[in-house]
Structure formats: C-alpha cells, structure tokens
Amino acid sequence: MNEKGQAIIFMAFLVALISLAGIVGVSQYQSSNLNISAYEHESRTYYAASSLEVVAQAQLTTYLMTNPAMTQPEMAAYLCAHLPGSTPRGYTLLNINAACSDTSFISLVGQSPSSTIPNGPYQGMNSPTTTYNLTVKVQETITGDVASISSVITIGDIFPFEFFLFSDLGSGPGTGYVQMNPTTAYSINGRVHVNGDFCVGGQLTLGNVTASGYLMDLNDSRCLDSQATSSVPIATDGSFTVFQTLTTSNDSGCGPSCGGSGLGWVDYDRYTWHGNVQDNLNGVIPLKLPILVASTAQNGYDQNWVSTSNSGSSRVIVDPVVSGGGGGGGKGQYAQMADLIIIDGVWYVSQSHVPRPTPVPTPLPTAVPLPTFAQWPGVPIWSDHPGSATDQFGNKVGQDDIRAFWALTTRPWVGTPNGYSYYSYDPTNNTINQNPALAQSIISYGSIDRTTVPTLSWGPAGFFGWSSGSQSANDLCGGSFACTPATSLAGPTVTASGCGATLATCSAGTNPSNATYILNATRSGFVDVDIQAASQAPNQIPRSNILPVNFDMRAFYTALANTNQGELGSYFSSGRQFNNMIYISSNWPGSLTGFSPAGNALDHPYQGAQADAVQPQSWSPSGQSALPYPLCSTVPSGGNPNGKAGLAFDQVGATGWFKVPDCATYSTISSATPNPALDNAFPNSIRIINADTITTPLAFVSNLPIYLTGNFNTASYANYANASGTPWSSTMIGGDMISVLSTGWSDGGAAWGVAPSAGSRIAGDTTIDSAFVTGFMFSPTAPGLEGIPPLLENWSGHNLNYAGSIYLGYYTVYYATPPATSGAATYQPPTKNFNYETHFGYPINQPPGTSNYPVYSVSKWIGH
C-alpha cells in the first residue's frame, strides 16, 4: 500500500489522461454507443470520475502553493471555480458547480498537531496535518450511469531543516543545477532535496533524495561536469545499511530497460530504492517556501562572473527591507521578524515586537515631542557613532542623539551603556570608555586576536604586521610593543600576559592605552584566501581583504542578562521577551543596488588603502589609516553641539593618537557608487566569535558573508543523534555565504598583503551544531555542494564536526567566489564528520522564524 501510495497521484494522472482520451473519442461517435456494453459504460463513467478526482487534486496542489493556509471553504470555492471546466464531453459533474451552493464534496476529517506525511515523496516526515475527504460524482449523459470517487487527502507542513541538504536555486528540469562530487568519503544519512537537476558522483553516499528536476549520475552527458566513471550508493531502506548504486545505466530517464531490468525509470526506481529516490518523472514538484516577496532580489553570479538571477529563490530570507519594492517583506524575512536589527553600527529594536517608548508622564520644562521612527528598522537603542550621526533613514543615531531620545521617555539611560560595543565614548575624557570593570563587549571591527587564557576566546587585537604575519613594530609610538591578548582588554592597563614577551615602552615612554589598541585593530582584518586565489585580474586581489564586523556571542548573552537602564537586557524585561532573532548588516555605496529593477550589487570598496590624514599613518603599504564608517561623527556646531568629529578618540592624560573621524569625509552609503576622493572604509562581512555556548534558540541572519569562528553550540552537538537529548539549542545562521574558521584561527596568519600559504593558517578541531542558510556560486571545475561551507586553513589531521542542516537558498550576491579546491595556497581538507541534526526532524524543534513548505498527500481511494 505504501509503495503504491507513493506513486498514486502520478499513476492516476496517466489513468486520467487515457480515460479522458477514450471518453472524448466515444462521445464523438454516438451511434457506436448501441454496441457498448453496460459494463463498459459503467467503467468509462468510473474512469471519468477518477480523472476529475485527479484533476481536482492537481488544482488543490496548485492552490496550496499560493495559499498555504487554505481552509475548507476556500478549497471548495476554488474547485467550484476551476474543476467544472475540466469535465469531459458527454458527462456531467453532479456535486461541484459554479454556484457552489453545496460544499460537502470536501469535508474536514481531522487535524493533528504532531503526525507524519502518509504518502508521496515526503512520506514519514514529521508534520502537523489536516485531513479532508474529497468526493467527485460524475454522470454519463446518455445512459445516466453515475460514479463517484472519494479520496482522503492530507495537507501537512514540513520544514527546510527536516532535510540535511536542501537546494532552492531553481524549479524543474534544466534549472537550479547543482552537483556533488566529493573526493573523500561523504555520507549523508538524512534527506536531500533539490529544486532542479541534481548530478552526483565521487565518494558520495546518499540515504534519501528527491529532486524536482532529474537525478543523474555525474557521468551522464546531461551533467555539466560529466566524469569518466562514477557510481553513487543510495540506501534502499531506512536502515542505511543496504544500498544500490546509481549509474548512467539506471539514472533518471533511463529506459526502456534501466540497468538491464526491463523496467522504465519510474518502475525501476520504485522497486529498487523503495521510495528513497524520486524526481520529476515521479511527480516531484518544487518545494517553495510561502514567503511574501514584494518585488525582486539582487542578482548573484555564476563561475564566470556572469550575472545570475535570484528571482524566485529564497534570497528574501536574508535580504534587508529596502525602498522601491525590493527585498520582500513579511513572512520569512528575518529583517522584518527580528527583534534586534543592527545596521552600520546602530542597534534598533523592532516596533513590531517591542512596545514603543513611553514619554515621561509629566511635562518637561521645554516641551519636546518624541521623535518618530519608521516601522523598519525600528527605534534606535545604541550606536557606535560617538556624539551625533545620521543613518540612511534620516534618523539622528549618534550615541548622544539616542541618549537624548531615551531621556524623554520613562526609560532614560543611566550613564553610557558599555555592553553593546567597545566604542562606548566618554565625552568628558575624549576616549573610548576605560572602565576597568568592562568585560568583553559584543561588537568590534577589524582584527581579532586569539587567546587560550583562561579559555579559548577572541577579542580585538592591535595591528597585524605583514612581513611576518604577527604584531611587531608600530609607528603609533615610534618604537615597538608586544601584542595585547583578548583577556587583557578588561583591565585598566595594557599587559603582555600570554604573549610570551615583555611589553616594550614607546620611545616617548608612554605605552598605548586599551583604547588605542582597540581603535588600531579596526584598521585591519584578514584575507579570505578563496577570494584571493579565485580573483583573476590584479585589481581584484584587494577584494580578499576582509574588514569584518565581529559579533561576540558570549558577550551578547551577558548583555542580554543586564537589565540596567539603557543596557540591552532592559529592553527585554518586564514581559517584553526577546524573540531570539538577530538581523545584522553593513552598507557601502552601491551595496543595495540591484533590487528594482533586478541587477547586481556593487562590489565592496577595496580595503587596505583607505586614507584619513587626521589619523596615525599605517605602518604598512597594505594598511589603511582610516577608521571604519560606523565610528564617525558629525562636526560640532551651533546647530548640532553633539558632534564629536575632530576630538580625541583615545586620550589618556595628555596623550592620544586617534581622532573621531568626520562622517562628511566618507562616501554616502546610500549613493550608487563610492566617491574616490572620499574615504571608503566600510565593513564588508560579519564574523561570529566566542559562540561555543548558545543558551537559547537563536536565528542570526545577515545579507552579507558570515565567517563562523571556532566552536558553535557545542553542548548541543553532544546530543545530535538523539532527538530527545538535552541540553540542546535550536540555532540557524543565515548569510550570503557562510565560511568556517577553526579553533586555531588567528588573523595574524592571514594578514592583508600576505601571499596565501596554508602553512601560516593551521586549523584546530572544530565542532558546530546549527542549521545554515547560505548562498552558492557554482563552478563545474570547483567543488559542488560538498564545498559548503568554504574553509580557509590547513585542516590536515584535524576534524570538522558538523551536525545540522544546510539550506542552499540563492546565488551569492557579495561573496562571488566558488569554493576553492584543496591546495597549499588555499586549504587542505579536514576529516569531515558531517551528520544530520536529528532534532530538526520535528516541527517543534525548528529555529526561530523558520517558514514551512505546504505539502499534499493522498492516502486512500474509494470508488462508488
């Protein structure tokens, strides 16, 4: 019954087509009816009812794609409007008509919050289900014979992370092509679904695969990177112990004798893999999330840097909300759903989920109305801009601007919050806050340093040298001084603890302060060797200079627990619970072009040569003197006394090296292209650090590339094979492309301007438990899906342990680099221990904000 049910809709369509052809033919020759037996009349009427039952199911499946929450009255109305027109000549549809006065032909049988899909390609997947009974009654016009067919249909919701690997780059045959061809063993004991064509080869082993295009052996000439020989074992049951190989002789479209069996593809596939392999020829249709998309998505790139459309993809999941209709809006878009939105160094709380600030109940001496803010991104609560600044939406969002706003409410700041970032500005002393009790903050920019004292962690570094890839001489003081480990940043003075060297004094006898170190770190970053190796033209090499926004997850949870007025936790106390969704982005001129009309975003300005004459000179030709844009302020004036541009940024006593930069010296981020005469030091990616312990469900999303550094959610990994095991936190990371940096990562091993060498980037064993939503840039000469996530280190002899689910939702907009093949200049592969996170197999365990796929299944046919 199960195998029959898996193919029942497809086979019924064939029956319907045959019967319809026969019915029409007979009705055209009325004289021949005298020679047709009563049994034949009854049979033809039965087939007419069967065909209309199948057509009704097809129409409901189509309707489900546009209305995933369709109700019984809505389904009845839809069939009344569409099904009568499909009735064959010579027959009358008795119980469904345009008037729709009686809707009992479709009736609710029951609902279950926790059930499984009974049949079809997704049989056995966990889902809340709603079951209906659908009856079609047909009468032959001449004889009056009546036949009715009833079916039990089940509508369920499955989720993208119920698959280990899901690709949504296309729809049907000839689109959304992806391939897997691992050179080392890669076993997927979890479901795989591809919206489009799927070619497989190499040392891949699969458990269950569905594709809305064709499933092909990589040696098939229809594959873009056809191999000389290839065969992939695919499990024939759920035990993942018995396999049958897929080859060119028995892949999709084989026949009339697949593998010499005498069977065509549909029958051979069904009886060989027992439902574990199904594609377009088996009736598999694209699974599309019911996401509300207002207009277009930015284009991505293919391997030849040719613009590739993201229309119809899932790009809206990670896109920001933009004017002009692009970027989507509503369900499925994390920029809309997140309680916390961070853009260009400004933190906003969502007005949709967090109550608006309440004005103080008594009139102020000078009546000042509360400023109003757009629905998106919301109300600002923090900014890395000292003093005053204006965001892309026209809001005043400097630290003093936000302080003044909240002073008008019942929740004024108490002092200057210091949990959000390292750039809490002390206007009295003209420096970044030097509070000795300051622990790690959440946001930093640029270079980070790695320490193992007292535990493995990363924090803002000083400035990495290029000749040796380590910190050394620095022109800030005319002498030399040793590195500052992350653990020393909490102290009032700079120490050399953990550096293995004695802190040298500057030639003037004054050591740089913590503020100087932290600001100096913002002027460098690291090299992405995949981008460096893939860039062809000399002017593309600087693309690989990554200037990241670093997000410290450990510090985030500390800040979330801090309910002091103005600190992060104060906005999610007193019943305003954080919804565990974070959206973070950074802009540069042209970064948001390509939404309407569809096109490509402008590449990020190349970092490493951005000048600012008021700052100390960098001590390397590859460096830059400018600080990143989120640290700029306006010039103080009579109309805007809160401006801090030109004031000291790191003054200790009478000494200071850095000045607060003037926002007017930077290109306007809302412009289409950078102004080459202005500064263009803009962060171009997001980096997650110190995320080994995740204590809540979490969705962390950006439209930019994300670099996940070190372990992530390790306590959950211990239970990945036990869906009822605890502790476990459901997490998802979504970005333009997600790359993994190991526990051994240090920016000093990948400094700007240094030729790529895996010898300077030695990985450490790394463990990750999370779902990924990521982009992809296909190249038939580079790894396929097995290259996700990209790796940038020498992993030889080290393990990458991953338990999760990978959702490939779009072509990358900003990363624009195919995953590199292994080699000394790029990386050496790890031992990959990749497993499906079985907790994700249950709807209740999905990460915050996860959308679902509505699916349609038929479990029973009854003829009358």
Image (cartoon, grey):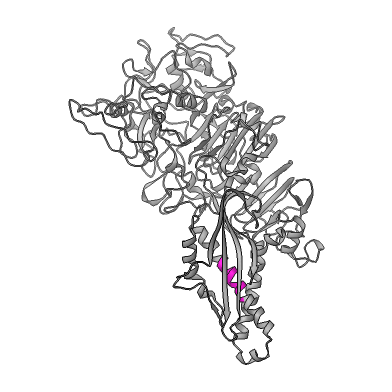
Q: Quadrant of the N terminus?
A: bottom right
Q: Position of residue 531 (x, y in %)?
A: 56, 39
Task: Report the magenta stretch's main SS.
Answer: helix
Q: Is residue 339 above or below residue 307?
A: above
User: What's the residue at 67%, 67% (across, down)?
Assistant: 11
Residue 328 visible in this rendered orientation of the protein? yes
| For residue 243, side relative to residue 508 (left or right) | right
User: What's the residue at 59%, 12% (across, down)?
Assistant: 500
Q: Is residue 149 above or below residue 459?
A: below
Residue found farthest to the right: 260
Along the viewing direction, whichever of 489 and 43 lies nearer the viewer: 43
Q: Position of residue 253 (x, y in %)?
A: 70, 63
Along the viewing direction, whichever of 418 and 152 lies nearer the viewer: 152
Q: Quadrant of the C terminus?
A: bottom right
Q: Any magenta on residue 502?
A: no
User: What's the residue at 64%, 89% (across, down)?
Assistant: 33
Q: Is residue 332 above or below residue 16?
A: above
Residue 535 visible in this rendered orientation of the protein? no
How many numbered discs sit on the rendered protein?
A: 0
Q: Position of residue 340 (x, y in %)?
A: 43, 35
Along the viewing direction, whichever of 783 and 278 lies nearer the viewer: 278
Q: Position of residue 636 (x, y in %)?
A: 26, 25
Residue found farthest to the top: 509
**Magenta residues?**
48-57
User: What's the residue at 51%, 37% (across, down)?
Assistant: 699
Residue 9 appears in which quarter of the rendering?
bottom right
Q: Any magenta on residue 53?
A: yes
| For residue 835, side relative to residue 648 (left or right) | right
